[in-house]
Amino acid sequence: MSGKSNIVYPYIPNSVPEIRQAMLDELGMESEEDIYKEIPDRLRFHGKMNLPEPILSEARLQRHVEKILAKNENCKNNICFLGGGVWNHYVPSVCDTIGGRDEILTSYVGEAFSDHGKFQILFESESLLGDLTGFEACNTPTYDWANAVAITSRMACRTTGRKEILVSENIGPERKIINANYCKPDITVVEVKYDYDNKCLDLKDLKSKVSEKTACIYFENPSYLGFIETQGQEIVKIAHEKGALVAVGVDPISLGVLEAPGDFGADYALGELQPLGIHMSAGGGLGGFIATKDEEKFVAEYPSLLFGVLPTVQEGEYGFGQVAFERTSYGSREKGKDFIGTCAALHGMVAAVYLALMGPKGMIELGSTIMQRAAYAKQELAKVKGVKVMEGLSFKEIVVNFDDFGKSVAEVNKALLKKKIFGGIDLTQDFPVLGNASLYAFTEMLSKEDIDALVSALQEMC
Amino acid sequence: MSKAYVRTNFHEARWDEPMIYELSTPGTRGILVPEVEDEIVAAVGDVAASLPDQVKRKAPLLLPEVDQKHVLAHYIHLTQEAMGSNLSNDLSEGTCTMKYNPRLGETLAMDDNFASVHPAQDDSTMQGVLEIFYKFEQIMKEISGMDRFSFQPGGGNHAVYCAACVMRAYHASRNDVKRDTIITTIFSHPTDAASPHTAGYNVITLYPDEKGIPDYEGLKKAVAETGDHLAGIFMTNPEDIGIYNPNIDKFVELVHSVGGLCYYDQANANAFLGVVRAREAGVDMCHFNVHKTFGTPHGGEGPANGAFGCREFLTKFLPKPTIEFDGDKFYRDYDRAESFGKVREYFGTAGVILRAYSWTMMHGAEGLRECANISVLNNNYLEKLLLSIKGLGEAFQGNGITRQEQIRYTWEELNKETGVGTDDINRRINDYGLPYYWESHHPWVIPEPMTLEPCETYSKCDLEEYYLTLKKVAQEAYDDPEMVIGAPYKSAAHKLANAMDLDDPEKWAITWRAFLRKHGDKYLKVK
């Protein structure tokens, strides 16, 4: 198949036959086959790809795709209590406006003189995340939170020269799988018990496991189950006494009200960018960050691009560039730190816009009001016969147990769905210790009416 | 017909913008958060205030306080100081395939039925998303000849890492655990060395022969030396210099003969859509940079997608979940005992897949082939123009091999004659409205490199504008080298006063706080 046809593609300007012919003539070629001649015939694909017939016009294509998307339910038409690492937070229109601008949306890495503004937005993103987490160094985005955990494990091992990572047993289940894989084959991952009675890390178990072999201890605050860890300082003390580092996974939305990891002595803060003004998009909205102290022993181990600010030759002008580029695999191939490539820069830029809009007061109010919603839901759900809510200090998420409800979590969720409610994440497989339990998240998108609707729906099921 | 010209009157937007922190006025708000109802407050009180002291934020939160109009204006100013492929002649970034990214893709991605879908929703409530994943997988299978795909990797380097994990799982399943070494080529992307290395593999790098083709004799030697420690090979084709390796099947045969697996990094797939496939080359695994080849935006460096494909015998090791169809419903299959695990939370960069599916459906088989045809034609047309420029050559010039979709050029001659190097030229073209061009991955095997990829997006007029601009800048280098070295003058910002400080821990500043701590008010815009 030659590909010659009468179609002029709007995205392919030189598909106009006369232009194409003029270019071929200029080159003294009959067709593109004079270029493909370099590919031996035995390697050529001689058939025609069996692909669906094209939908050439944008109008028809849009209808086609929208028809498929209409098969989805979404969190605007339903009341969403799902969380677990992606949350239905409000996305300000300003975030959409900036994130959708072609200048950055359709750019690549480039250099600061021509893409100055993009570099500045990413620098501001690093700075704002640093302020939020209490650190003076932060990377450009990783793929997601899990990727941030995994990268931090390897960074900490390089910084300490050790090969063992301790992780709290109740970190996000997918993050656990991804970190374990990323640590292969040379890093040992040991789980530290979680004290489900007191809703905190089991320090006795931690002390028995941390040693001079330990590179880093990783726990999440709030935990995957929503509980606020009250022993941050003690964990840091225990780790540092053995020369181990401490990494804390955070929900950035919590840091208006909760103490930042950098402020209680941790060495790294990492987490998910999605709640900071990025649409969930079926998981497409993920992006991770890692913040740490601005000390060479930490900064030199990032695999990520790091954008730094310096003056230009023009007085009063900020310029930007890549800090310690040779560290990266772009600069040094396999001798660089892990590997780097295209990750989630746009989400880092949108997060900057979000944090700039929110400011300190916005973040404090958001954290406070989310806690009130979760506390209210806890109180109301506990009134439903057969429903137990796990006690403990919670931020945005709570664990709801249906052991005495007479229905499995799956059955509860199925019934809720009929009332256009997305029930919580089913924990029965990943956390069997919690019984027939489910994880409910309460963002600012939920009103009292929404929470009451959940309670009523459950009461009706009894 | 439109005529090419050099944008001599160009000036990039330059807003002389301060940092967002410098716009801060205490008490100002950019957005208000939804209040909780009085009944909730009455029921639970101020929960955050009653937190134990040791978990409460005590340090002031140092975020800026800016009203909404000025936040918006600040970031619009900054975006205007950037050049995306939708607004510039971005054939500049070779190996990156900077296409036009249709606005329709953005409209679709903002649909509530997509943007507001939580990835943990029940499968029954996200049939549309799963259908698009499933259908795009069928398309990718046909384009490559592979048997299955995973869209979990978030970029090309992530897909290469995924391949290394599959390779590790495959050899482990055969109890063949001594295989600890992989081979790659110097003109494959650096991640073809770095990602497998992160997964625990030693790396051997092959250099090209005198014609610029990966050296088969070198491969034979490496294979013989590695013996039964060889896990596999990771290679790009065409390589980043635009030369197709005609011996690819011989490479595959040799690596297979000693029990290794073969991986095709298809970052440069725009050269061969419908022309060649991974299957005919005989490889076991491959990936496509969906954000490059299938028309989706690069986002400044993501979100992206590295669609990972493999043959049937490796599918059991794929990351979980896979997306399946039972004849009635689409579903995510997590029940995969031999899967190596996961590389990303949930199941992939869905926005990229949605846009890529749409883009591909608009092109069909003929349209994809048209992309390849016009890309290689554009590249050869541009090559002919550029090689007439004094001081400019190309890698392995005169080797008699017709280039495919991109070319690594060299300013070596110009540099010798004028002292002006590729970095200087790169800054100077910005004064004429051309975006930064991709020089080369490191190390620079080709001196003073410039890698251009004029994919199907670029018109004949674009190619000629690029040529005329480079010709003008090269002439400037001969006439007034100091002026070129001092460039840029009309871009969004000037060059750094001392770029070496970026490598100095005492001076680098990755955040505003570090900048203030290290430099005080010395460089502040507003003192």
Image: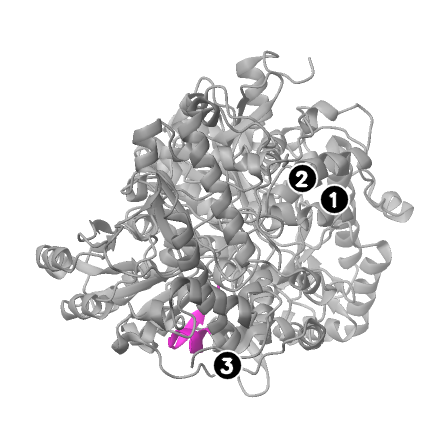
From what the image shows, is residue A249 above or below residue B142? Answer: above
Circle 1: residue type: Met
Query: Horizontal placement of A162 versus A136: left or right?
Result: left
Classify mark 3: helix, strand or loop: loop
Residue for badge 3: A51
Q: Are marks 1 and 3 on the same chain?
A: yes
Q: Quadrant of the C terminus of chain A?
A: bottom right
Q: Quadrant of residue A52?
A: bottom right
Circle 2: residue type: Gln
Task: Tell me, for residue A188, which label it has, or none.
Answer: none
Residue B525 seen in the current view: yes
Classify mark 2: helix, strand or loop: helix
Circle 3: residue type: Leu
**What residue is at 54 percent from the left and 46 percent from the top?**
A288
User: Label 2 to label 3, Cα distance in Å?
Assistant: 39 Å
At which x and y percent is residue B162? 38, 59
Q: Nearer the viewer, mark 1 or mark 2?
A: 2
Residue for badge 2: B80
**What residue is at 89 percent from the left and 44 percent from the top?**
B42
Query: Horizontal placement of A175 versus B58: left or right?
Result: left
The chain to which mark 1 is attached is A
